Image (spheres, rainbow, N blue to C red):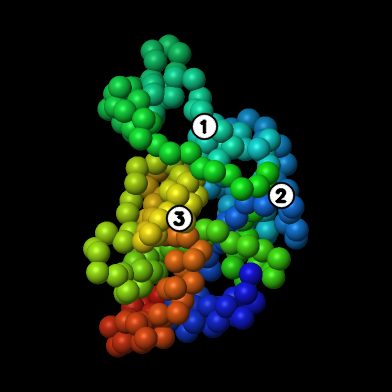
Amino acid sequence: MDMQLKQEFLAKWKKYFGQAELPIAFYYTHQVQDADFQPPAKGRSCIICELARVRNGVNLAYGKEAIACSGARRYLGYTDKMRPDFEYFLSCGIENVMEGERYIRTPEMVLEIMKNQKTLSRKGEYIVFKRWDKLTEADQPEVIIFFASADTLSGLFTLANYDQTEPNVTFTPFGSGCSSIVHHPYLEIDAERPRAVIGMFDPSARVCVPADCLSFALPYKRFVQMIGYMDESFLTTPAWSKVRQRME
């Protein structure tokens, strides 16, 4: 991790976004340094809820055994399978057996969606989440994750479009909260034109974030490019200054 870049972004973030929440870095690793291991999961858990600790400055590491949710295990690269009868779980359920989330109309539609889903090529035994200001030289971020208010999100979205001519440089794929902050942006890392992912629309994960919060996640290399454009972009204009004042 480039410590000069770390400080550069901190200064620019404060200048243009004030006290808005700093992003979180995510990466795979075989060796964890300076991070607390999440204990083995007991019962139901949601990684989005657990990331509240990271957003508050706690460095957090996970191994497979610490992830109870089968969906999270898949979207974080630990398995290519989902829970049994997942197509019913996501849709109508099974009478007297399983309550369905009713996010998709029919089990058949869920199966069709799953046909097109890709799996992650995990590059380490562990995953690490750290807030940007907690990163050290030894860290190697792969995805950057913002938990953002509407005003912050508008700034990030517009900055992502600053050097692009193609209008769909961000996208909002259907999926769980953890898929929107890790799975989908991670799949963009090797793309010719990496996109950012706007997410946190999953009703099951919404209870883990503030009411006005969505997510904006993107590959680290794309994030570095965006940092380089901040001082010449709309962030320096009177229009953004008015938004910036409201954010305070």
Element class at badge 1: loop
Disc number placed over residue 30 in the picture, else none: 2
C-beta proximity under 8 Å, tags 3 and 1: no
Type of the residue with mark 3: Asp
Residue at (24%, 63%) from the top-left corner?
A: 167
Whether residue 164 is situated above or below residue 240 in the rendered picture: above
Whether residue 232 is situated above or below residue 115 in the rendered picture: below
Labels 2, 3: front one: 3
Whether residue 62 is situated above or below residue 71 in the rendered picture: below
Q: Position of residue 80 (x, y in %)?
A: 52, 32
**Circle 1 sits on which residue?**
80
* Residue 102 seen in this snapshot: no
- Kindly report the distance in space between the C-alpha atoms of the residues bearing marks 1 and 2: 20 Å
Q: Earlier in the sequence, mark 1 or mark 2?
A: 2
Which quarter of the figure is the N terminus placed in? bottom right
Horizontal side, residue 222 vs residue 167: left or right = right
Type of the residue with mark 1: Asp
**Circle 3 sits on which residue?**
190
Residue at (44%, 66%) from the top-left corner?
A: 222
Q: Earlier in the sequence, mark 2 or mark 3?
A: 2
Element class at badge 2: loop
* Residue 108 seen in this snapshot: yes
- Give the crowd class for mark 2: few <14, some 14-19, many >=20 residues within 10 Å: few
Type of the residue with mark 2: His
Q: Position of residue 170 (x, y in %)?
A: 33, 59
Q: Position of residue 160 (x, y in %)?
A: 36, 69
- Kindly report the distance in space between the C-alpha atoms of the residues bearing marks 2 and 3: 21 Å
Residue at (62%, 51%) from the top-left corner?
A: 28
- Give the crowd class for mark 3: few <14, some 14-19, many >=20 residues within 10 Å: few
